Image: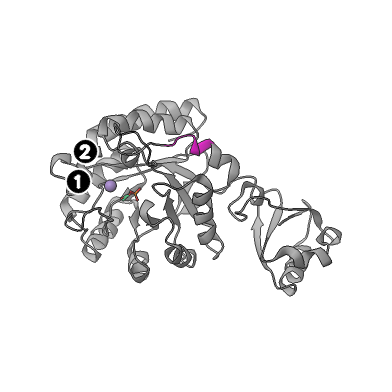
């Protein structure tokens, strides 16, 4: 259930409604928007039947939420969320570009890549230190050593950094070095990890599961938000289908669908979504045209020798070319880059 307050409701009136909800044994989550305040009620709503909140001063209307997710729903925050990562705003008019290697392989390669992607227009450096690999014999990432390189290179180049958290036991470690904590596709329904990330002070980048429906994706985000962390950025990265020409099937329709259903920002990862570098630019352009709030792109100084995802990684100069092309699309849909 969602309680919409009147535009002129006072703080005292809002607090009074919150107290009442709590007294009924329910949880109240307050969203203070530019226009008005909205309160999400979590818990068995039957309790509210004996206490009609419509009559409370300051309350405009009480809406039942028929969807299974509440706090991430558009109804809860009609104007949309803008997430501020130390000055980098995600979800506003400006697009965010996250770029970097699939895996952090060493300090030098990370520095070379970071300087190039920053120069081209990226604001966030990506790179995995804990890698979810299909084979246990593949490169698993440098662990804390990789996190240190990421933080150092991020600071040296003036970029924010995003890296994947795979295990609840590593949360404090990853939070220490990262500006954004990534939860990968394979962990989208690792509910303990989601709950832990919901307790974090850091923004979370949540990638869509390999075979997750949009409802399951939004419910995974609801796990994080219901723990109090509203700073969630969604990422469409392709889903499994019968098609074999591309590594995954990039579901760009998910972008306008999620924009309609949720207030959370959504970015697109055309690197994992296609699996092949020459499809990355067209799908990046299409993603921005579809309304994505940004892109996550894999870039490697020498894709042939990459320890993971070489075939989908762009050379730095190709990334710069992609940004030039994406800029034109951004302008045509009223976004800035
Ligand atoms: C990644 O971004 O490094 C990654 C492993 O992506 P995904 O979880 O989408 O496969
Ligand atoms: Mn990768």
Alpha carbon distance from label 2 to label 1 = 19 Å
> Which mark, by number, is residue 112?
1
> Residue 272 location in percent, x, y?
32, 42
User: Disc 2 or disc 1, which is closer to the eye?
Assistant: 2
Q: Is residue 289 left or right of residue 62?
A: left
Q: Residue at x 42, y 53 (%)?
A: 205
Vertical placement of 157 versus 41: above or below? above
Q: Is residue 32 left or right of residue 246?
A: right
Q: Residue at x 24, y 37 (%)?
A: 314
Vertical placement of 311 versus 169: above or below? above
Which is more toward the observer, 122 or 28? 28
Give SS at disc 2.
Answer: helix
Q: Tell me if residue 12 can be seen.
A: no
Which is more toward the observer, 198 or 92? 198
Which quadrant is home to the N terminus? bottom right
Q: Is residue 258 left or right of residue 161?
A: right
Vertical placement of 239 versus 280: above or below? below
Residue identified by numbered label 2: 311
Q: Are marks 2 and 1 in contact (CB under 8 Å)?
A: no
Give SS at disc 1.
Answer: helix
For residue 58, which quarter of the picture? bottom right
Which quadrant is home to the C terminus? top left
Q: How is the image coloured?
A: one colour
> Residue 335 location in percent, x, y?
49, 33
For residue 52, which quarter of the picture? bottom right
> Residue 245 location in percent, x, y?
29, 31
Q: Which of pointers 2 and 1 lies earlier in the amino acid sequence?
A: 1
For the residue carrying disc 2, how many other residues have a C-alpha within 10 Å: few (<14), some (14-19), or many (20+)?
A: some
Range drawn in magenta: 251-256
> Residue 185 location in percent, x, y?
38, 51
């Amino acid at each position: 259930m969602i309680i919409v307050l009147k535009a002129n409701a006072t703080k005292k009136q809002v607090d009074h409604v919150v107290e009442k909800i709590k007294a009924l044994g329910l949880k109240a989550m307050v969203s203070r928007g530019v226009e008005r305040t909205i309160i999400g009620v979590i818990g068995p709503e039957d309790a509210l039947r004996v206490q009609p909140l419509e009559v409370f001063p300051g309350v405009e209307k009480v809406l039942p939420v028929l969807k299974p997710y509440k706090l991430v729903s558009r109804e809860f925050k009609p104007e949309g969320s803008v997430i501020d990562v130390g000055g980098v705003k995600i979800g506003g008019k400006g697009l965010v570009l996250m770029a970097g290697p699939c895996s952090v392989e060493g300090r030098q390669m990370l520095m070379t890549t970071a300087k190039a992607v920053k120069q081209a227009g990226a604001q966030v450096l990506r790179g995995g230190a804990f890698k979810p690999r299909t084979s246990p014999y593949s490169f698993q990432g440098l662990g804390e050593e990789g996190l240190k390189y990421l933080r150092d290179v991020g600071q040296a180049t003036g970029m924010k950094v995003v890296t994947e958290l795979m295990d609840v036991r590593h949360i404090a470690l990853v939070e220490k070095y990262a500006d954004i904590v990534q939860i990968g596709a394979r962990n989208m329904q690792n509910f303990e990890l989601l709950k832990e990330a919901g307790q974090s002070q850091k923004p979370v980048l949540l990638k869509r599961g390999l075979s997750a429906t949009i409802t399951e994706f939004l419910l995974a985000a609801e796990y994080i938000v219901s723990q109090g962390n509203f700073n969630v950025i969604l990422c469409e990265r392709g889903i499994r289908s019968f098609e074999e020409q591309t590594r995954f099937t990039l579901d760009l329709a998910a972008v306008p669908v999620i924009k309609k259903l949720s207030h959370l920002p959504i970015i697109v990862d055309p690197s994992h979504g296609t699996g092949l570098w020459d499809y990355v630019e067209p799908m990046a352009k299409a993603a921005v045209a579809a309304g994505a709030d940004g892109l996550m792109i894999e870039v490697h100084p020498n894709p042939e020798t990459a320890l993971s995802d070489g075939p989908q990684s762009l050379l730095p100069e190709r990334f710069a070319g992609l940004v030039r092309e994406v800029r034109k699309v951004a302008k045509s849909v009223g976004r800035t880059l």
